[in-house]
Image (cartoon, rainbow, N blue to C red):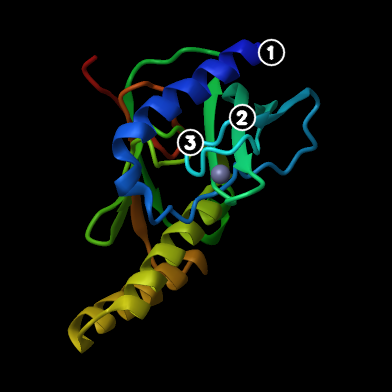
Amino acid sequence: MMKLKKLKNLLKEYFETFKYNLFFYSSMPEETKAANSNAPEDFSKIENQPCPMCLSNSMTLMEFSQDVPFFGTVYIISMQCTKCKYRKSDIEPAEKRDPARYTLEITCEEDMNIRVVRSSEATVKIPRMASIEPGAAANGFVTNVEGLLNRIKVKIEHLRDGAEDNVARKKAKNMLKKLQNVMWGKDTMKLIIEDPTGNSAIISEKAEIKKLKK
Ligand SMILES: [Zn+2]
């Protein structure tokens, strides 16, 4: 279990980043909280911390661990401001791994259940469709392929709704159609997760793992 001190340091780190980048975070990503199907066994919480967004002392920090089969313990950290509703989450595996790129060919409906661990440092890519970029505004989470595709779906729906011309709207609509077919097992798609920290993974024998240079 990580100490609360570590949580506080993490918040301080974010705070420093936000001081300089506040402008860029006016629109927060859809990814909000760590997907967690199991009830957390160890759970710690500190309330009334300074919020990097609205600067009031209304931030709640939470931390718990989750056991991910064939991967190990993952610490999940989440922060939420009760005042401005700002949220951020990240993950940290107990076990250190080498920087790696995971490539999964999604070919059937069963692939929706493949577990995915994504740290905020990872780039998630679906070639020719969409990507989730890393960085201070990114969230880390434990989910499955379906959960990840749903996040991407929400992003593309925003693109569709905000499209200024018919070409862009049609493109987004076609992507959504493809995504839905992949989720139903009627089409295939490549999913890539690249993490220079080594903290992310696609947990499946089907996933191809390539080491990245440190
Ligand atoms: Zn706030």
**Which amino acid, by three-letter code, is at mark 2?**
Ile
Determine which quarter of the picture holds residue 128.
bottom left
Mark 1 lies within 8 Å of ligand 1 (Cβ measured) = no
Position of residue 89 in the picture relative to residue 64 (left or right):
left
Location of the C terminus by quadrant is top left
| Residue beneath disc 3 | 52
176 relative to 30, above or below: below
- SS of the residue at dot 3? loop
x, y (%) of residue 100?
A: 32, 25
Question: Would you say the residues marked 3 and 1 are in contact, meaning their CB atoms lie under 8 Å apart?
Answer: no
| Residue beneath disc 1 | 1
How many numbered marks, from 0 up?
3
Spatial CA distance of label 3 from label 2 is: 19 Å
**Which amino acid, by three-letter code, is at mark 3?**
Pro
Q: Nearer the viewer, mark 3 or mark 2?
A: 3
x, y (%) of residue 24?
A: 30, 47
Q: Nearer the viewer, residue 4 or 99?
A: 4
